[in-house]
Image (cartoon, rainbow, N blue to C red):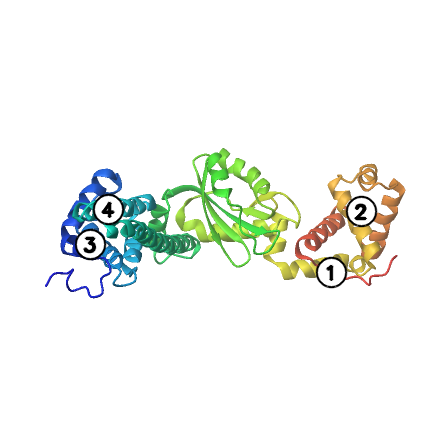
Amino acid sequence: MTAASSLAGARYPLAANLLDSVEALTDELIIRITDADSSYADPGLLTVEELREACLHNLTEIIRALTGAQPPLLRPARAVGRLKAERGIPIAALLHAYRVGGRLIWEWLTERSSGPGDPQLHELATTLWELIDTFSDAAVEAYRDTEILLVHADAQSQNRLIRSLFDDNSSNPVRVLTALRTLGLPEKGPFAVVVIEPADPGAALPGNLVHALKDIGVHSVWDAQIDAHAGLLAFSAQSALERATARLPELVAGRIGLSASFVSYTAIPAAVVEARIAAQSVRQGSRTALRFGADPVAHLLVALPDAGRRAATQILGPVLRLPDVERVELLAVLEAWYRCGGSAAAVADLLHCHRNTVRYRLRKIRDLTGRDTADPAQSADLHLALQAVALLGAAPTGTGESA
């Protein structure tokens, strides 16, 4: 019994007869698509056996549906869509194969018909190309779904590799070396670690960040952590790191800290700690990146936050307990005093007030705290406490009353 005769209920015997020649059709289709499309030239992507199996199953189901004996079964179309996505065959090559297959089926139908006036031929023409569209659509949908899964899997794999760089791998250094090689990073520095605490908590990094840094000679990989983003920078010259330090605040809004540069990948965990301390040493709202070591007093405060808050309360407590307006005025004068190098005139210009107002408020701070900005040791205490308030949020809420 032939394949055609075994197909009960065939509406178009002309199409059903093709089932007996589907093997030969498959051989011809393979020749045509491989001759016309270089995507199939590399047998490492798709073997001849795999291509033949995909062509045979799709031709068979297209012809079966073409006979009118059964609805189209799209499993082979979805299977070939998944296969070609997995092997990296372009989607254009997938669609081209269906078009070539449609033309081949039509040629064989016309050769076996009674002539141009064959009534079956006219009806089969419309049905054939509808089926080619149906199978192509199913294959494309499966292809794109598979692409999404593959991209997601690749991203997850890369994220795991990047995260492994920042873990403590002292007991398994080979893991870090493998990650560096896979990510295309050098095995030996100079390196630096960056920690970014976004101004908008949970915000993603800008999509152009990696390319922008690469343009100035810095290769980078980034890990999204719970409250920050950690990045490993690789560069060949210290000047590239300096350019990155200046460029980062232009690219990202938030507190940005960088570790000291280092050579061995084994120093990455310690560098993460340095970069995090440096980031926390940047005042909220400041568009700057801070290198570890650039502000040791701030580093000390954020490394010992409880002690810093206690010091701020002990030194500036009477000021911090003032009503909101008066507290803000006194802290602003004290901040400006240090920024302006102790010049009452410069502070007055900065705050748009009279210099006598500046002196009055400094005296009030002295009277409340028992510490005078004119005394170097006492002024150092005030400056330390002021930094603690700015960095650690040490100021308690005021009464809300006006002075």
Q: Which residue is mark 3?
A: 14
Q: For the residues marked 2 and 1, what is the alpha-carbon distance in whole angstroms?
A: 18 Å
- Which residue is drawn at the image coordinates 65% and 45% (left, top)? 286
Q: Nearer the viewer, residue 227 or 191?
A: 227
Asked whether disc 4 touches disc 1, contact meaning CB atoms under 8 Å apart, the reply is no
Mark 2 residue crowding within 10 angstroms, few (<14) / some (14–19) / many (20+): many
Residue type marked 4: Gly
Q: Quadrant of residue 16?
A: bottom left
Q: Which residue is disc 2 drawn over?
A: 333
Q: Disc 2 or 3, which lies upstream in sequence?
A: 3
Q: Earlier in the sequence, mark 2 or mark 1?
A: 1
Question: Residue, x 20% and y 66% (percent of image)?
Answer: 8
**Camera-nearest label, 3 or 1:** 3
Disc 2 secondary structure class: helix
Mark 4 and mark 1 lie on one chain; the one further toward the N terminus is 4
Q: CA distance from mark 4 to mark 2?
A: 99 Å
**Position of 297 relative to 313 (above/below):** above
Q: Which residue corresponds to mark 1?
A: 313
